[in-house]
Image (cartoon, rainbow, N blue to C red):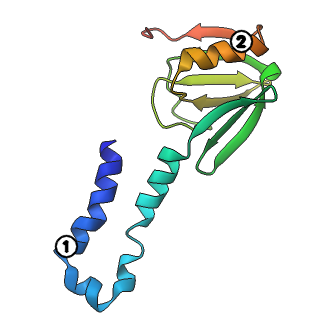
Amino acid sequence: MYLVGGIILLPIAIFFLDKKTFTENPFTFLPLPTPIVLTLWVYFGTYYKIENKELVYRSAFFRGKIDIQSVKEIINGKTMWSGTKPATGRNGLIVKYNKYDEVYITPENKDAMISDLLSINAKIKITEYPGTV
């Protein structure tokens, strides 16, 4: 949340520190809101839902669908540092599907998401990462 606040306050601070530049050439201000827009797009545009036996995820430009029947394992509480991460937090869920595919998600209620996925595919292996409560 501090990142979002800093990204919003930075252009405002730059504007007030150098008003003359912006009043003489207002187009100079146009690139400054870009990080704000991108951050807000990721922060408020990230969601996960189960629809037609598929896990649908979206986070800014990351979008996709996973057939829940193809999910092999879910690792709860581990952060994935590389790969497909349509997520906004840490200690989420790593969803392993197909043979080698995986995606990292951070639903608001991890237990409810796991329960909903298990209700569709009871063969999913759930692995609790050490240190997860």
Q: Residue at x 40, y 67 (%)?
A: 33
Residue 122 in the image: above or below residue 96: above
Q: Which residue is drawn at 68% across and 44% down?
A: 63
Within 10 angstroms of label 2, few (less than 14), some, or many (20 or more) residues? some
Residue 98 in which image quadrant: top right
Going by the image, does 53 lie left or right of 128?
right
Going by the image, does 82 lie left or right of 53?
left
Point out the image quarter for the C terminus. top left
Closer to the chain start, of discs 2 and 1, is 1
Residue 3 in the image: above or below residue 37: above
Residue topped by disc 2: 118
Could you tell me which secondary element the residue under label 2 belongs to? helix
Q: Residue at x 77, y 8 (%)?
A: 123
At label 1, the amino acid type is Phe
At label 2, the amino acid type is Leu
User: Separation of disc 2 and disc 1 at Cα?
Assistant: 53 Å
Asked if the residue under mark 1 is in contact with the one under mark 2, i.e. CB atoms within 8 Å, the reply is: no
Could you tell me which secondary element the residue under label 1 belongs to? helix
Residue extending farthest left: 17
Point out the image quarter for the N terminus. top left
Measured as percent of width and height from the top left, residue 126 is found at 64, 9
Residue topped by disc 1: 16
In depth, the one of 133 and 72 nearer the eye is 133
Measured as percent of width and height from the top left, residue 109 is found at 52, 21
